């Protein structure tokens, strides 16, 4: 029965994408497909945290932004002269800050409780801050002064951008470990507040540290893992393929590139899904669900709840970081202002809730359904408003207002979908198996 339901829902989803290709354009359909695949991976990461362990993480966009940062640091070519002018000074300042923090932690652990420990820690932090700023500040100013209109940052390593996907997961995993060590002993509501705040801090750093990410000037022209359309249009084998399909090479090149992206994203989605399903069905997965359902009983059985929560928090964040690097790869640029925690974080949560919390296939389905209607709500809303106002005069104020408001149908559509699913299938379209 469950298998039939899976096949039915994913078949409907495929027909919807096919309908967009037939009635709008294949470029739009494939663009939606690629974003649905990335959304599905991100939803899998949230499902690992919430569906497996009941951890309420509201810092999803922060971890996705770290994935985007990895894409820049790995794939962009190094800026000529940036390292000589201030790169090593910036790294030295950051290293000094890390050493200061480590020394403060060491002092906290080794000294006895009292005013001398407090004074020592405060002194270490203050001295470390001013020393690191003394080295770090001039170095970053020197980097940002290098042709700021086009560069003004260090650049990256110039490696293939696909390598940034696991590196993005590593960045997010390290950040999650640090956050988890601090916050996972808190109640779930405090964890949500802490992760949201840290997410905002990460995004604020990306917006303002021009030497690393160009800030709000954005990093554009990132390398691709797939061919460029212009190059395809002058390649003999591609022209022969285009002639065989009877299509225009210019339009077909755009479709071909999107198909290549889809192929890469499908491979990554299948890898993450296989690992997630293997973990869920293992003794570790059963233990995580037991902790989720009753922490007190699991703790009484000798399970280290906080340690297991840290594990699953890091694993879910790694998956989100991978998806963030993939999203930057697809966009071809890093735009820090596009990471809006209060908007897209809850969109990902709706994907998990609608698909079915605790079910990996449900998370994937939710990613497809929600992102599809998030994109298509505007054209469908415009079509609906045109039908409703078809009997009104062309200059009717009400008609113009309704048509101009069609773009705002997105939020209402999300609300309607969520209400319908919670009413008729409270555990999601594909509920978790008992």
Image (cartoon, rainbow, N blue to C red):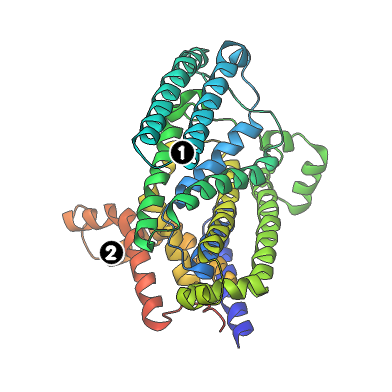
Comparing 177 with 366, the one in front is 177
Q: Is residue 320 above or below residue 143?
A: below
Number of disc labels? 2
Residue 2 appears in view: yes
* First in sequence: mark 1 vs mark 2: 1
Where disc 2 sits, the SS reads: loop
Residue at label 2? 390
Q: Is residue 258 above or below residue 20?
A: above
Judged left or right of residue 153, residue 250 is: right
Q: Which quarter of the rendering shows the N terminus?
A: bottom right
**Residue at 45% across / 50% down in the picture?**
182
**Residue 350 lies in what quarter of the image?**
bottom left
Residue at label 1? 111
Judged left or right of residue 223, residue 180 is: left
| Farthest-out residue, left | 397
Q: Position of residue 31 (x, y in %)?
A: 56, 52
Q: Residues within 10 Å of mark 2 (few under 14, many from 20)?
A: few
**Residue at 69% across / 62% down in the picture?**
270
Q: Which quarter of the rendering shows the C terminus?
A: bottom right
Q: Is residue 411 above or below residue 353?
A: above
Q: Position of residue 188 (x, y in %)?
A: 38, 63
Where disc 1 sits, the SS reads: loop
Q: Residues within 10 Å of mark 1 (few under 14, many from 20)?
A: few
Q: Is residue 68 above or below residue 355?
A: above
**Residue at 71% across / 32% down in the picture?**
159
């Amino acid at each position: 029965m469950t298998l039939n339901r899976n096949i039915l829902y994913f078949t409907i989803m495929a027909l919807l994408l096919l309908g967009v290709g037939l009635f709008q354009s294949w470029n739009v359909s494939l663009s939606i497909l690629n974003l649905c695949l990335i959304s599905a991976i991100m939803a899998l990461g949230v499902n690992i945290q919430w569906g497996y362990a009941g951890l309420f993480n509201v810092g999803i966009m922060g971890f996705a932004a770290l994935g985007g940062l990895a894409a820049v640091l790995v794939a962009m070519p190094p800026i000529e002269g940036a390292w000589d002018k201030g790169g090593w000074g910036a790294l030295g300042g950051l290293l000094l800050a890390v050493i200061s923090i480590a020394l403060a932690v060491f002092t906290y652990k080794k000294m006895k409780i009292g005013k001398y420990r407090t004074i020592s820690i405060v002194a270490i932090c203050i001295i470390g801050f001013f020393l690191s700023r003394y080295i770090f500040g001039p170095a970053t100013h020197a980097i940002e002064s290098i042709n700021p209109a086009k560069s003004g940052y260090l650049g990256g390593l110039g490696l293939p951008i696909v390598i940034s996907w696991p590196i993005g997961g590593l960045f997010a995993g390290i950040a999650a470990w640090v956050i988890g060590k601090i916050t996972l002993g808190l109640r779930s509501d405090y964890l949500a507040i802490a992760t949201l705040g840290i997410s905002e801090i990460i995004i604020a750093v990306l917006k303002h540290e021009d030497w690393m990410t160009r800030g709000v000037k954005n990093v554009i022209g990132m390398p691709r893992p797939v061919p460029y359309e212009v190059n395809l249009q002058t390649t003999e084998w591609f022209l022969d393929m285009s002639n065989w399909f009877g299509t225009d090479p210019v339009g077909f090149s755009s479709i071909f590139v999107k198909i290549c992206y889809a192929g890469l994203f499908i491979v990554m989605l299948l890898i993450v899904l296989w690992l997630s399903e293997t973990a869920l069905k293992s003794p570790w997965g059963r233990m995580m669900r037991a902790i989720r359902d009753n922490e007190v009983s699991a703790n009484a059985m000798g399970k280290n709840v906080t340690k297991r929560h840290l594990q699953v928090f890091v694993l879910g964040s790694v998956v989100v970081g991978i998806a963030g690097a993939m999203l930057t790869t697809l966009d071809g640029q890093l735009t820090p202002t596009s990471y809006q925690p209060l908007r897209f974080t809850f969109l990902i949560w709706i994907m998990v809730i609608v698909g079915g919390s605790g079910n990996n296939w449900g998370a994937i389905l939710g990613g497809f359904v929600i992102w599809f209607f998030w994109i298509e709500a505007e054209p469908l809303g415009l079509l609906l408003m045109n039908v409703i106002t078809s009997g009104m005069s062309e200059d009717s104020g009400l008609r113009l207002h309704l048509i101009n408001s069609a773009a705002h149908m997105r939020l209402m559509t999300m609300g309607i979908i969520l209400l319908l699913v919670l009413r008729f299938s409270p555990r999601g379209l594909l509920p978790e198996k008992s």
